Amino acid sequence: MRSSKQRDAVLQVLRESCDHPTADMIFERVREQIPNISLGTVYRNLGQLKDEGFITIVESSDTKVHYEGNLTDHIHFLCKSCHNITDVFCETQVPTALTDMGLQVESAKTVYYGLCNSCR
Amino acid sequence: MRSSKQRDAVLQVLRESCDHPTADMIFERVREQIPNISLGTVYRNLGQLKDEGFITIVESSDTKVHYEGNLTDHIHFLCKSCHNITDVFCETQVPTALTDMGLQVESAKTVYYGLCNSCR
DNA sequence: TCCATAAGTAGTAATGATTACTGTTTACAC
DNA sequence: GTGTAAACAGTAATCATTACTACTTATGGA
């Protein structure tokens, strides 16, 4: 992968974002630095950064794909009322049932659903 | 929700499916019973069945939405080579960090990624 | 330093899964 | 039975994402 200021900007924006932005949200934020960047460029770089393991995808309640630049081990809580995604940093362990079945686990994604503190 | 043979057929097909079919896969299977059912009807009923809690959505590696009729508590393993989804039935526990943060958990979805037995 | 070349880009067109719309049919309560 | 609102088939529209094209740029070797 060759270096490009567009890809650097996409990654930087994603790492600075506390929310879990969609491609078009990232597009708008990157445009503040690179006004003529193309939406296709954002999509292409998000795909490459994902393939290379620099970013991940987060499950959400809408149809758009949400991205995440924070790779530290954590899980997500999705409020079914306000649809906000909360990061929860805690230890998790892989059930032995998986390795018993011959499945070689490399990573995991866990999402909990319910009502958040302010929606209760 | 009023009863309809189309919705009954969609739910029956999904409960009989061992894989995790997409809307168009379900459409093809339901067509064997109801040849002139509309794809829009399948989508509408899948949405209703999801809203009413009869079925759930499974994360997958493609862009289409995959559905699941098996509501017994289980997790999923997604092979990054063959992209097959394996059901793993085992106990899971909710980390205390969530309730400590005031998050009221109602359900959970966990996906593990890696290589399955035959792809290793 | 200067090319060669292949990866990357901007802008735009195309794709395709999903949703919306419209006139007709059907379940169900009275 | 009849009214009515939900559900339907068929089709059109939406819109997030991907593909395409001509141009630009990073990078490695001469």
Image (cartoon, coloured by chain):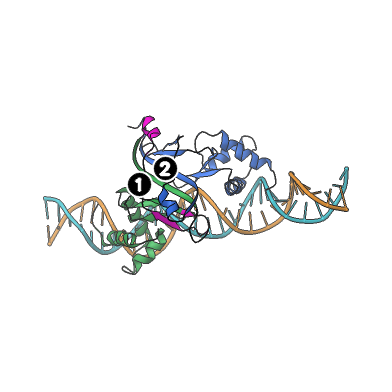
Chain colours: A blue, B green, C cyan, D orange
Amino acid found under the numbered disc labelled 1: Glu
**Secondary structure state at the residue bearing disc 1:** loop
Say which chain tag 1 marks.
Answer: B
Q: Locate residue A30, reporting x and y percent.
A: 60, 38
Q: Residue B91 carries which label?
A: 1
Quick check: B103 above or below B108? Answer: above
For disc 2, the marked residue is A111
Membership of B41 in magenta stretch: no
Q: How far apart are marks 2 and 1 (CA)?
A: 16 Å
Membership of B100 in magenta stretch: yes
Q: Locate residue B53, reporting x and y percent.
A: 30, 49
Say which chain tag 2 marks.
Answer: A
Q: Locate residue C25, reporting x and y percent.
A: 26, 64
Q: Nearer the viewer, residue A117 or B72?
A: B72
- Foreground tag (2 vs 1): 1
Q: Which residue is drawn at 49% across and 35% down?
A: A19
* Left or right position of B3 against A96: left
Q: Quadrant of residue D8?
A: bottom left
**Secondary structure state at the residue bearing disc 2:** strand
Report the magenta residues as a range. Answer: B78-103
Amino acid found under the numbered disc labelled 2: Val
Q: Which of C30 and A14 is in front in this view?
A: A14
- The answer to whether residue B60 is visible is no
Q: In which quarter of the image is residue A112?
A: top left
Q: Which residue is drawn at 54% across and 34% down?
A: A17
